[in-house]
Amino acid sequence: MGRWTAPSMGRPEQVGGRVSGPGPVTTGVVYSSPLERRPLSA
């Protein structure tokens, strides 16, 4: 979680490819609670 979350702040382009890489599980979590994951990561 923290591994792809750290680079997501500096590289939004890599996030899209990384989220789609690991699997739909990560994408589902981010889409399920984008507000809950935003403050946690920030």
Image: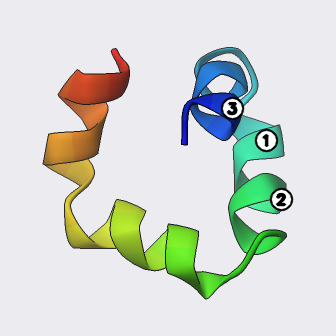
**Labels 1 & 2 near each other (Cβ < 8 A):** yes
**Labels 3 & 1 near each other (Cβ < 8 A):** no
Element at label 2: helix
At horizontal 79% and vertical 41% (from top left) the residue drawn is 13
Amino acid type at mark 2: Gly
Disc assigned to residue 25:
none
Residue 30 is situated, as x and y percent measured from the top left of the image, at: 38, 61
At horizontal 24% and vertical 72% (from top left) the residue drawn is 32
Q: CA distance from mark 3 to mark 1?
A: 15 Å
Q: Earlier in the sequence, mark 2 or mark 3?
A: 3
Asked if residue 39 is positioned above or below residue 26 in the image, the reply reads above
Disc 2 target residue: 17
Disc assigned to residue 3:
3
Residue 4 is situated, as x and y percent measured from the top left of the image, at: 68, 38
Amino acid type at mark 1: Glu
Query: Depth-wise, is mark 2 or mark 3 nearer the camera?
Result: 3
Q: Residues within 10 Å of mark 1 (few under 14, many from 20)?
A: few
Element at label 3: helix
Amino acid type at mark 3: Arg
Query: Depth-wise, is mark 1 or mark 2 nearer the camera?
Result: 2
Residue 1 is situated, as x and y percent measured from the top left of the image, at: 54, 43
At horizontal 83% and vertical 59% (from top left) the residue drawn is 17
Asked if residue 32 is positioned above or below residue 38 in the image, the reply reads below
Disc 1 target residue: 13
Residue 9 is situated, as x and y percent measured from the top left of the image, at: 58, 19
